[in-house]
Image (cartoon, rainbow, N blue to C red):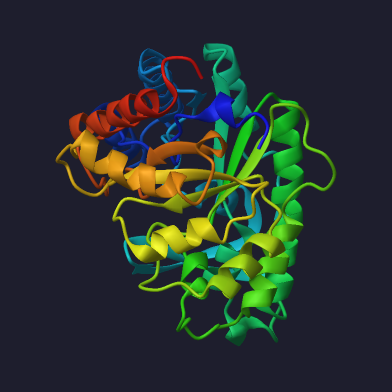
Amino acid sequence: MADTFNYRIDHHGSLVRPAALTAARERAAQGGDPEALREAERAAVKEAVVFQRKLRSTVVTDGDLPREDFRSAVLDGVSGFRRTGRRTGGLADWVAESLPKAEGPLLADWAGLLGELTVIAPKVSLPSPAYLAATCFDPALAGSGGPASARELGEALAEIIRAEIQLLIGLGVRLVQLNNPLLLAHTATEPPATGELSFEEILAVEALALPTGERPEGVRIGVSPGWAAPASVDLARAERMYAGVPADRWVLPFDQGTAAEIDLLRALPEERDACLGAVDATVPETEEIDAVMVRIDAAAEVKDLEDMALAPSRGFEDVAGRPLLDADAQNGKLVQVETLARYCWGNEF
């Protein structure tokens, strides 16, 4: 829980892509100059950093602006994956044709740019290895060069992601977030079918991605296990999730005020931080401060407020070209997170 105060105002990482970047990406897809796209990406990241500085955010990200979606840092940066041409839930489907191998650093260039642009703590988000394994493993390929199991694929990805986290920390990144939108479903009182990975295998794969030993001073590694709480939570399963994945911070949905959201927080061990996704990132209307503070006060009944941070409930454009809100509404939500943080902790963090 040390250092939580450094990162009180957080966000999931993806921001709405500006129109100029979207146009540059379309031109590149039609055979345009790839260097022009690179310059448009850099310009967009610089603009996003300026906004986050003005907001007095306690972390700063590149907004996922240089990437197609929240998985792309890994899928575009390692070998062994192929697009299928299909889409599921707006995401392009990928399949693992062989065990992945890193072709070099995944996000080092963009992390370095953040360090050049601001002294605010850089944050990087990555897809979790268990999520990628669960969504990219094809058992039909197991006998023809593909991974033998989803567990094997997940463990290979975990080694790559762990090495990347260690590299990013060495480059000055202070907050790393692993995203697994499927994990919270496994804490439900009636969890879904396990698919190719059991709950225990999911936890083991996620844990393998976290660097072992003490974190360097000021470094936090977090997990976002999903963007919505299940209808009801099995406290024992939630406790198993937290015990199985030794992350410093858990980024939890907290924008609906449900008993399940409280139960997810109640099960969190005392020594772990919680970042509450207390502002709904899916609706453009700004919520009443008092209404959100009622939810935060309820959280403070089960978890020390000093061990918490605030964020929107999820990213704003996890898939390029599919924003949840427009840029103005997004910015209003981020401003509201800062306002709420000052209600909770005053003007000094």
Report if residue 222 is visible in the image.
Answer: yes
Query: Is 48 on the left or on the right of 22, as rendered?
Result: right
| Residue farthest to the left, as pictured | 285
- Taking 151 as reference, is 250 above or below it? above
Residue 310 shown left or right of residue 215 in the figure: left
Which residue is nearer to you in this view: 203 or 253?
253
Q: Nearer the viewer, residue 42 or 172?
A: 172
The picture places residue 230, in percent across and down from the top left corner, at 39, 70
Q: Residue at x 29, y 26 (%)?
A: 335
Q: Residue furthest right?
A: 213
> Compared to 58, does 67 lie above or below?
below
- Give the image location of residue 201, x and y in percent: 69, 74
Percent x, y for residue 92? 40, 62
Q: Name the foreground residue: 267 vs 57.
A: 267
**At 59% across and 86% down in the image, what residue appears?**
140
Position of the N terminus, as image quadrant, is: top right
